[in-house]
Each structure stands twice: as C-alpha cells, then as structure tokens.
Amino acid sequence: MEPTRTTMRRRGLLTAAGGAALGAAGAGAAATFGRDEGPGTETAPETTVPFHGPHQAGIATPAQDRAVLLALDMHETVDADRLAAVMRLLSDDAARLTGGVPALADADAELAAEPARLTVTFGFGLDLLDRLGLAGALPEGARPVPAFGTDRLEERWSGGDLLIQVCGDGDLAVSHAVRMLVKDSRSFATVRWTQRGFLQRPTGGGTARNIMGQIDGTGNPVPGEPAFDSAVWIGEDAGPFAGGTMMVVRRIRTDLDQWDRLDPVGKGRVIGRRLSDGAPLTGETEDDPVDLEAREANGLPVIPASAHVRRAAEAGAVMLRRSYNYDDGPREDGSPDTGLVFVAFQADVEQFNTVQAHLDEADLLNTYAVAVGSAVFAVPPGCGEGGWIGRTFLEQY
Amino acid sequence: MNDTMSNALSRAAAAAALSLGLLAACADGGEAEKNEDDTARAAAAESVTVVDAWAVATEEGMTAVFGVLENGADTEARIVEAASDLSRVELHEVAESDGDMVMQEVEEGFAVPAGGEHELHPGGDHLMLMELAEPLVAGDRIAMTLVFEDGSELVFDAVAKDFAGGDEEYEPHGDHDAHDM
C-alpha cells in the first residue's frame, strides 16, 4: 500500500498548540517552527484566498467561477459541544484546503494542491440556534424571510441548520473540498440540499451575465468602501456575530422558454436595463444612475412602473448580491431547468425583505423568475490562526 | 519509510545506544530506562513536536493514531512507549506477511532522526490503541503520551476523524489469525 505521505508543508492547526507549548522549551523547537510556514507562502498569491481574518472569506471575495452550497441538518442528538467539535474539524479542513494543503486524514491529498481561489463559508440556521438554546447569541438582524405571495417554495430547497458555501475557480478543487467537508460532518448531519452554481466572468473584467442574459450585479456595494461595511457586516457591538453577516439563499427558477418570447426591447423593459450592455434605459453605460423620473414624449416613464430595477431601487435598501447560475436541464421534454442560486449578504435580513416585498408586490420579472427555495443563515465572523468558525457563539454562550 | 532507511536508522540507533550504554534497554523490547548519566543533555521530549495528529474515529475495539514527529535536536530521538487514558497503546508498523500487508508491534520503537521527522500514517507506522474503553467520536480529542528512550515524556492531543482508509490486517506476534483493523 502506498503511504499517503505528503510533501507539502503541514500546519498543525488543531494539534500544534499542545505540542508547541510543550516543545517550545526545547532548543530545537524554534528551528522546527521556522520550517512550518503558512500555506500561502508557497503558492502563487492569486490562487489562494486567506481563510483567516476578521470576516469569513467567500463574501467580500470577488466571485469565483463555481459554487456549491450545502445545507446540512444536524442530528437531533447534536448539542452545542458537539457542534463546536464539528466546527473545529470543518474549520481545520477549510483552513488547510483553501491554503492548498490536504486536510487531516485526506484520502485524496493530491487534489488539495491546486486550491484555485477556494473559499469555504459557514452559516447557521436560526432554528438550529434556537434548538441549542443559543438564540440569545443571534444579532438583531437575524430574522426569517417570510413566504412571499409569488414564491413557490419547495421544502427540498429550503431551510437548513448548517450552510457550507464552497467557491472556487476549479471544479476539482471545489468537489474535493465538498467531499472532505461532508466526510467530516456526515456522522452528525444529513444533507438537506445541495445547490451548484456557475458564473462566467467576462474576459475583460466587469459584471457577469446571468443565465437570462442580463448583466447581473450592477450597483453592488464595493468591498473596502464604508457603504459596504455598513450594508454587509454586522456591527461591532452586536455580540458574537459582530463582523459576521446575514445570508439569504434563494433558489430562483427561470422560465427561459417564456423569456425567449420577448424581443430585446421587451426584455429591456422588464429589467429596466438594456440586455446588450446593462445600461439603464435612461443611460449610456452600465454604471450610469437609474433615472426613475425620466419620461417618454408621450409622458410614460422610460423605465416602466413595474420594471425590476425601478421596483428594487424604490425599496431603497442595499445588499451584497453574490449569485450564481444553475442549469440542471434540459428536462426529458427538452424544456430548460435553469435559474439562479441567488445569494445575498446583509447586516440585517430586513434589507433583503424590504426589497423582496417590493418586488413581490409588482415586478415584471416575476413572470419569468420564481423563488422555489429560501433559507436564512447567520454567518459568524472569521477566525484567526488556530481558531474556528462558530467559536464566538459556541464557546461564550 | 523503506527498509533500507529503517535498517540504517536502526544501525545508527544501535550505535548511539551503545555509546550511551543503553543497549540493554533496547534489547529487552523497548522498555525505557532512565539514563542517570545523561542529565546534561536536553530531554528528547523537549526537542520533539507532534504536528497534524489525528486518530481514526471508531465505535469500539482498536484504533490508530497518526501524525508527524519532528525532531529539532541534533541527536536522534527514539520513542519506546506510548500511552493514553483510553486504552493500552502499542507502537505498530505495517509489514508484508505472506503477500498481505499486516500490522504488528515494533520492538525497537520509532526513531525520529536528528533534525528530521518520522511520519505516522495510514499504511505505515502508527500508534495503536488496543482496547478502547468507550467509542471515539469524530471531533473528540484524545491526550496521548509518548515515552522516549531517555525516559522523558511528551503529551499531545490527537483529534478523531472519520476515515475509511488504511485497511490493513492486524497480526499480533505469534498469532496468525489476523483481525480486521
């Protein structure tokens, strides 16, 4: 049998602390530690995204090409202590794999070598925290998303106790990470749903198109700007979730057969933007402001009363959209089975609810896109080296 | 680790042991004996660190602990015993026996070369917990103790993980009815 020996540098994230404390007194310990460099130091910078930091990766991180979102249901026997043990395991896996280092007990260690900007992001269902008696740890902005009138929600795409978002620029890296994370949680959880998404970023940069052909994501808050921080991150005085965010995942099924029936002008009027370049119907380029007051010569608004951008803009709330496309078709009759894995991050779920309530009331896009899944997760802050995601509420409460 | 390296290490260890007057301790099956003449030298336990330690989660019976032993000293460190609160522990190697890979207790212990490392991994050397008193669940952390030839002891934590690999047979000395791991 071939040993699973790896030549890559290891990181003793789970175990070094004990060993190091004891070994530090030894003359040789410093030399040993000097060799144990972080994973980021030996891989080209653009292929790794740091796992450790004040916020979890995979949120402000520029969207990668692929995403797998997993929602797990924890077994009823799992208490806060066991959840903490699971999160230590999963955080350790994530820290290693995103750094291009095999997980502990990684049976396919070779697959870890090319992380391809892999990120792993964890979120927790509100019901789970309630069940564990930890609801008091949740921030004020942790609220459910109501079932809207236009929703056609299916149980199989909704809810979940533990959300794991795995993103990366390579299918193999993402697949391997998902496999490893599931291996380390399957003793304590069942898989409630899995959603796979893809994104094709324009070669010249800029906003990607979605599966309906729209340039989708225009006007997103920009990481690093104060408006981003206040819209996305939970405030510093908010307890264990400070530095975290609230994540809304909606599976939105698109009816591309119906969408096909519209001509480009008609599609533009549904959205309020031209399909060709994403510019608002009142502007010339994608980044031009949407002029909701502009009128045609006949007095009708240039951007129709129920156009998607108007309805969203009038709601007046900001969120970070980080959505992916899905394509599970074609079905047996040749009809498409496509849509969006819509992902929004915001400090308060109310931000999403405000916009969605407005769209639910009237949005021409509702004819072509309907939510079939919905879930909310509280996303804790990131962690430092040796730390683990969830510690802020699993150890302090 | 291949046989040539093992042999070379064993020879080096034997030579080192001879010069330190420890041959008797080695020859009688790895029983550690405190070397009173060697107090000036740093204890082996202070030069060795264990990184990436993990154990195979299991409902009952025996299980294995893996990890990487790193030796920062300029002299070899030899592990002659291991212990855990959960079970009696043996130092095991995997070797070929009648065409099958079997694991068996090593008599000479594990040598961690000067300035080098010794990896315990599935399919190779490992620490074997022989009779677990209770189930070892993924995520559990177990305290392990390594005893070096000089009598010094190193405590480290290993985390239990679900793992399906390393499916060797266990063959205790003098017992040819091998058991599944």
Image (tube, coloured by chain):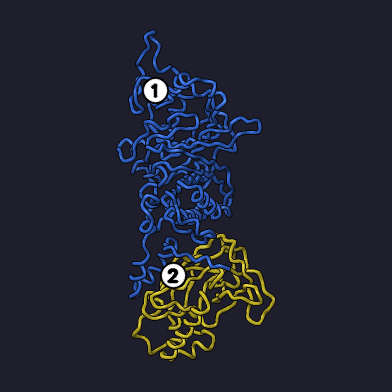
* Mark 2 element type: strand
Q: Amino acid at mark 2?
A: Val
Residue A301 visible in the picture: yes
| Mark carried by residue A314 | 1
Name the foreground residue: B112 vs A393.
Answer: B112
State the residue at coordinates (63%, 33%): A331
State whether residue A279 is above or below residue A189. Answer: above
State the residue at coordinates (59%, 38%): A156
Q: Chain of mark 1?
A: A
State whether residue A315 is above or below residue B169. Answer: above
Letter of the chain in yellow: B
Q: Position of residue A22 (x, y in %)?
A: 39, 71
Characterize the local packing of mark 2: few (<14), some (14-19) or many (20 or more) Cα atoms within 10 angstroms: many
Colour for chain A in the figure: blue
In this view, the residue farthest toward the right is: B177
State the residue at coordinates (37%, 40%): A233
State the residue at coordinates (37%, 44%): A243
